[in-house]
Image (tube, helix red, strand yellow):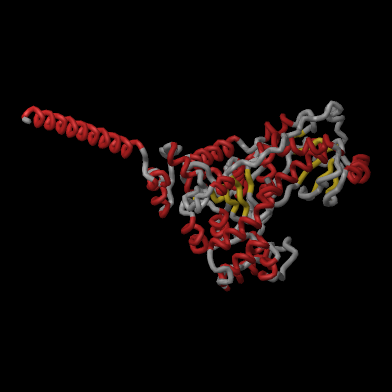
């Protein structure tokens, strides 16, 4: 009997020992799992460094040196790339680069292309408009000089437009690079020779959107009378289509290879780009809510009566703006107005961009300042611009020169992960084209006409909830993704 009891006690002890060992092992495994696996909250949470950067946006920051990239773990990067507020896999498409469809840059001249023939005279060019309008005009004038066998004198930039910018060509562009890179296409000189100061010359306003025949039959024969022809305007003087392939290629070489920004602008632009990159993938938003555009277009939505009157006065007193009486409601309904900052914020949210998305504002001074930016800032606090990314000392060489400041925005925009223009003007077209040339980088062009209808219904309560609005916006722009990308 005692022997049986001893055996029973031994068995119980073994069972208890095994149970304790199993409990201990389970505890160790549980602790290991808790340590190794981040929680759901940790997966979706931005890194602390980024949060600190976020909180500091209430005051403008100036940096004396380049920012070090915030620490981003693999986990937080994955969470960032969910993009949309809903976190669905569909919103990954927002950042996804478009397919190139086997298209590649094609700018090399054909085997039949010859060096420039002997020059018959000198072509002077007075450019007009803002930076991107002047850029396009300069590229056209390079092609025109080739067509009419002219020596091109470095173009004169517009100093009398709305911006009153006193910049010369060499202040904005790399003059020596421009001349050297086109030496096999067109002879280019910096100044007209002194001995031609009193030569026979004429001022000619070339016809808009003209083809090869116009320049060969109407302009080239003028060399029989004149040694110098001055083009009074440069914008839209050459047709876009039905030109010889080598002329089209020359325009592209001029635009994307020869017309490089001045070294100081290139260096500062790349510095701004790198500082923006420190926040991760970013949107470059061309927010054309500026005084000149609003007054020119007659758009006053979301403005006070005093602001609307100020813009009307500017339009009436700007002599080269021909249209004076504009119905702002009709303009907006037709999609002819830039989106307001508030509309842009709702548009980005509807597409699915997270509130933590870094956004670079590629623009001059926003009309109305913080008052009109408040709604966009509340939705996307990480709004940056030149003045926040660089110190006053770093920007001082370009201050009071609209073209040079616009060039900085251009550099940051063409290198962004996504480019979104609030209005399809010269800057928007130039940047989208350059991004395609560089490798089909993503551009999202809002359908302003369709969007403002939806926006107004949402504001009026006809569309009851934001999810319905978002679904409509996404559906409307699905085809535009395909078309523009």
User: Who's the residue at 71% across and 47% down the image?
Assistant: 134
Q: Position of residue 383 (x, y in %)?
A: 49, 51
Q: Is residue 106 left or right of residue 427?
A: right
Q: Position of residue 215 (x, y in %)?
A: 88, 43
Is residue 384 among what the camera can see?
A: no
Q: Nearer the viewer, residue 441 or 19?
A: 19
Q: Is residue 214 left or right of residue 353?
A: right
Instruction: Please identify the residue farthest to the left as the structure is shown.
Output: 2
Q: Position of residue 277 (x, y in %)?
A: 50, 40
Q: Nearer the viewer, residue 240 or 4?
A: 4
Please tell me in which quadrant of the rendered image residue 223 appears: top right
Please tell me in which quadrant of the rendered image residue 138 appears: top right
Q: Is residue 451 above or below residue 217?
A: below
User: Who's the residue at 41% across and 38% down the image?
Assistant: 71
Q: Is residue 117 above or below residue 60?
A: above
Q: Is residue 448 above or below residue 18?
A: below
Please tell me in which quadrant of the rendered image residue 14 appears: top left
On-image quarter of the C terminus: top right
Is residue 418 among what the camera can see?
A: yes
Q: Nearer the viewer, residue 481 or 430?
A: 481
User: Who's the residue at 93% across and 40% down the image?
Assistant: 224
Q: Nearer the viewer, residue 314 or 66?
A: 66
């Amino acid at each position: 009997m005692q022997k049986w009891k001893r055996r029973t006690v031994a068995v119980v002890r073994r069972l208890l020992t095994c149970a304790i060992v199993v409990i201990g092992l389970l505890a160790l495994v549980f602790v290991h799992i808790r340590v190794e696996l981040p929680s759901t909250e940790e997966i979706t949470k931005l890194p602390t460094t980024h949060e600190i950067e976020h909180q500091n946006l209430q005051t403008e920051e100036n940096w004396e040196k380049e920012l070090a990239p915030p620490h981003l773990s693999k986990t937080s990067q994955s969470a960032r790339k969910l993009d949309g507020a809903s976190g669905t896999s569909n919103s990954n498409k927002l950042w996804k680069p478009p397919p190139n469809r086997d298209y590649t840059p094609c700018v090399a001249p054909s085997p039949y292309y010859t060096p420039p023939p002997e020059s018959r005279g000198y072509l002077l060019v007075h450019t007009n408009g803002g930076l991107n309008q002047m850029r396009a005009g300069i590229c056209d004038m390079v092609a025109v000089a080739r067509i009419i066998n002219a020596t091109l004198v470095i173009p004169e930039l517009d100093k009398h437009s709305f911006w009153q910018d006193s910049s010369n060509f060499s202040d904005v562009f790399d003059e020596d690079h421009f001349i050297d890179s086109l030496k096999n296409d067109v002879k280019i000189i910096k100044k007209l020779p002194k001995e031609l100061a009193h030569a026979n010359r004429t001022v000619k306003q070339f016809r808009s959107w003209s083809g090869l025949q116009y320049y060969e039959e109407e302009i080239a024969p003028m060399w029989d009378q004149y040694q110098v022809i001055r083009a009074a305007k440069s914008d839209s003087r050459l047709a876009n289509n039905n030109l010889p392939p080598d002329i089209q290629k020359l325009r592209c070489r001029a635009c994307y290879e020869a017309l490089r920004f001045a070294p100081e602008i290139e260096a500062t632009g790349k510095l701004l780009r790198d500082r923006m990159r420190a926040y991760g993938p970013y949107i470059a938003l061309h927010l054309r809510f500026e005084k000149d555009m609003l007054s020119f277009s007659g758009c006053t939505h979301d403005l006070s009566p005093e602001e609307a009157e100020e813009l009307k006065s500017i339009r009436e007193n700007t002599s080269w703006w021909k249209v004076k009486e504009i119905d702002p409601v009709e303009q907006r309904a037709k999609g002819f107005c830039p989106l307001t900052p508030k509309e842009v914020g709702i548009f980005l949210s509807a597409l699915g961009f997270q509130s933590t998305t870094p956004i670079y504002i590629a623009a001059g001074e926003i009309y109305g300042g913080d008052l009109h930016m408040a709604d966009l800032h509340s939705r996307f606090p990480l709004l940056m611009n030149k003045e926040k990314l660089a110190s006053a000392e770093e920007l001082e060489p370009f201050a009071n020169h609209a073209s040079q400041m616009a060039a900085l925005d251009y550099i940051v925009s063409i290198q962004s992960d996504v480019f979104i223009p609030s209005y399809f003007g010269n800057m928007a077209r130039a940047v989208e084209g350059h991004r395609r040339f560089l490798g089909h980088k993503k551009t999202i062009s809002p359908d302003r006409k369709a969007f403002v209808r939806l926006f107004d219904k949402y504001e009026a309560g006809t569309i009851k909830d934001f999810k319905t609005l978002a679904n409509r916006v996404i559906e409307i722009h699905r085809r535009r993704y395909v078309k523009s990308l």
